[in-house]
Amino acid sequence: MMINRKFGWTNLDVSIIGQGTWLIENANSSSSSHSSSNDYNLAIKTLQVGLDLGMTHIDTAEMYGNGKTEELVGQAIVGRKRDEIFLVSKVLPSNASYEGTIRACKNSLKRLKTDYLDLYLLHWPSYQYPIAETMQAMEKLVSDNLLKFIGVSNFNLNELQEAEQALQN
């Protein structure tokens, strides 16, 4: 039986072991540049077995497999109770403008075949767009009920503090 813990200050229970999906679309390939439908079926089956074992936290990103990984995750969760899965995805820094973040999120939702994400992250700092612009877009997505929680990934302390400050303005 998988152990769950509260996600931060929320009342959401999240499995302490999550399923990362980086390169899962190449699950059976010796070369990461050649994927087949067998690889995709294996990836979907792998995610489903993880879910069956209680690993209900799935982490993905728009950049993984150029969106293909999100499609595979979407196929893996079809027919399951969405509120029993903690789904995380990430926006690329190159898409982190206000409009770009909103567009990227909506595209991820389509690929994942879901109405919302539990957590949406900026994958790493963008030096192209101000963090305040990205955070403002994420707050809009929360108010539109497309996201439950927002955050950042791969940030150092100063970058994290800047993101936090952007949310307080």
Image (cartoon, grey):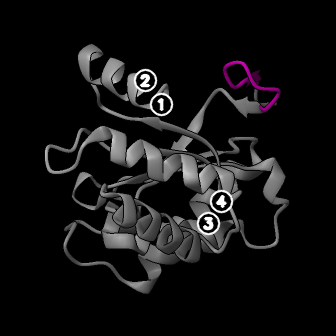
Tell which circle, 1 or 3, labels the residue nearer the N-terminal end. Answer: 3
What is the magenta range?
4-12
Q: Based on the displayed image, in which of its 4 quarters is residue 63 positioned? A: bottom left
Q: State left or right for residue 118 relative to residue 90.
A: right
**Number of the front mark, 2 or 4:** 2
Q: Amino acid at mark 3?
A: Lys
Q: Position of residue 28 (x, y in %)?
A: 37, 67
Q: Nearer the viewer, residue 139 or 36?
A: 139
Q: What amino acid does circle 1 point to?
A: Leu
Marks 2, 3: nearer the viewer = 2
Secondary structure at badge 1 equals helix
Q: CA distance from mark 1 to mark 4?
A: 18 Å
Q: Nearer the viewer, residue 10 or 80?
A: 10
> Which residue is identified by label 2?
164
Of pointers 1 and 4, the one earlier in the residue sequence: 4
Report the mark closest to the observer, 1 or 3: 1
Q: Which residue is mark 4?
A: 146
Name the residue located 30 percent from the left edge and 58 percent from the top edge.
97
Residue 59, visible in the rendered structure? no
Label 2 crowd bin: few (<14), some (14–19), many (20+), radius 10 Å: some
Q: Are marks 1 and 2 in contact (CB under 8 Å)?
A: yes
* Residue at position x 43%, y 23% in the image: 164
Circle 3 — which element? helix
Q: Earlier in the sequence, mark 4 or mark 3?
A: 3
Magenta includes 10?
A: yes
The 10 Å Cα crowd at callout 1, few under 14, some 14 to 19, many 20 or more, is some
Tell me the distance, in whole angstroms, between the alpha carbons under discs 1 and 2: 5 Å
- Say what amino acid the circle numbered 4 marks: Leu
Disc 4 residue crowd, few under 14, some 14–19, many 20+, Cα 10 Å: many
Find disc 1 in the rendering and name its residue. 167
Looking at the image, residue 7 sits to the left or right of residue 111; the answer is right
